[in-house]
Amino acid sequence: MTIAIFGSDEHWEELKKDSCDADFVRLYSLSDISIKIDAVFIITEDAAKDFSFITIPVFINSVCHTLKDLNAPENVLRINGWRSFLARPNWEIAGTVNNKVVTILKALDKDFTNVADETGFIAARVLAMIINEAWFALGENISTKAEIDTAMKLGTNYPYGPFKWGELIGEKNIFTLLKKMSTKDRRYLPAPLLAEKISE
């Protein structure tokens, strides 16, 4: 099985790191897709592209935009390609998971949960809110970034504190997701200090 990856160096390393049943090809342009490729991963930030010319399974990093938003064909599936999410053993996938997709995921040694085609998936939505609350706490002078990170790591056994996780994922990604979700529910409004940081 040959899988093509269109993304950054970090995405390339994170996606192919633990796979042993697939060969990987690095794409620098989507026009490089050949008939010998079984699937393509487009892991650029919120990949909004024209997929009409691709007939093989296409996995896109699209945390904020749904398949419906993108008017994506049935062979396109959404995944969370934020840093640290591709390395997880279980992926959230929105879209039609058929036998071909299951075979690809097995070759990547990934379990999956088929989720509704909603903005933010589940894990990213929850994590964005945790990071946002940390920014609210910092803005209210409750504690420092380092102390909040330490408290969350020790108290919840998370791999990172919320500020470290936000840096790893990219605060702009968190902010963009919160802004999009806040158009339907005001509880997702970004913390003022986070908004200020993004506008710097």
Image (spheres, grey):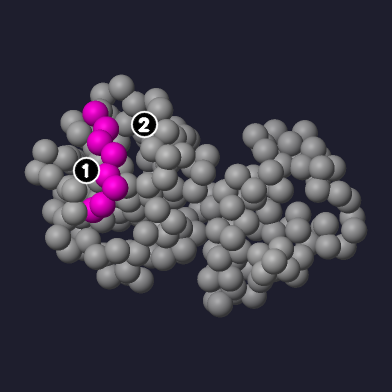
- Say which residue appears at 69% left-offset and 59% top-offset: 132
**For this rendering, which residue is in front, 194 or 71?**
194
Q: Is residue 147 left or right of residue 88?
A: right
**For this rendering, which residue is in front, 161 or 40?**
40
Q: Is residue 114 visible?
A: no
Q: Is residue 73 left or right of residue 176?
A: left
What numbered label is drawn on residue 22?
none
**Amino acid under disc 2:** Lys
In the rendered image, the quadrant that contains the C terminus is bottom right
- Say which residue appears at 52% left-offset and 40% top-offset: 84
Q: Is residue 185 left or right of residue 122?
A: right
Image position of 9 with respect to 45: above or below: above
Q: Dot 2: few (<14), some (14–19), or many (≥20) neighbours within 10 Å?
A: some
In the rendered image, the quadrant that contains the N terminus is top left
**Amino acid under disc 1:** Ala
Element assignment for label 2: helix
Q: Splitting the image into 4 quarters, where does residue 108 fall?
A: top left
Image position of 44 with respect to 198: above or below: above
Q: Label 1: which residue?
A: 39
Q: Are marks 1 and 2 in contact (CB under 8 Å)?
A: no
- Say which residue appears at 51% left-offset and 44% top-offset: 83
What numbered label is drawn on residue 16?
2
Q: Dot 1: few (<14), some (14–19), or many (≥20) neighbours within 10 Å?
A: many
Q: CA distance from mark 1 to mark 2?
A: 13 Å
- Say which residue appears at 42% left-offset and 45% top-offset: 8
Q: Is residue 154 left or right of residue 117?
A: right
Based on the picture, tell me whether residue 65 belongs to the magenta stretch.
Answer: no
Magenta stretch: give its range: 23-30
Residue 125, horizontal then vertical, whole percent: 56, 57
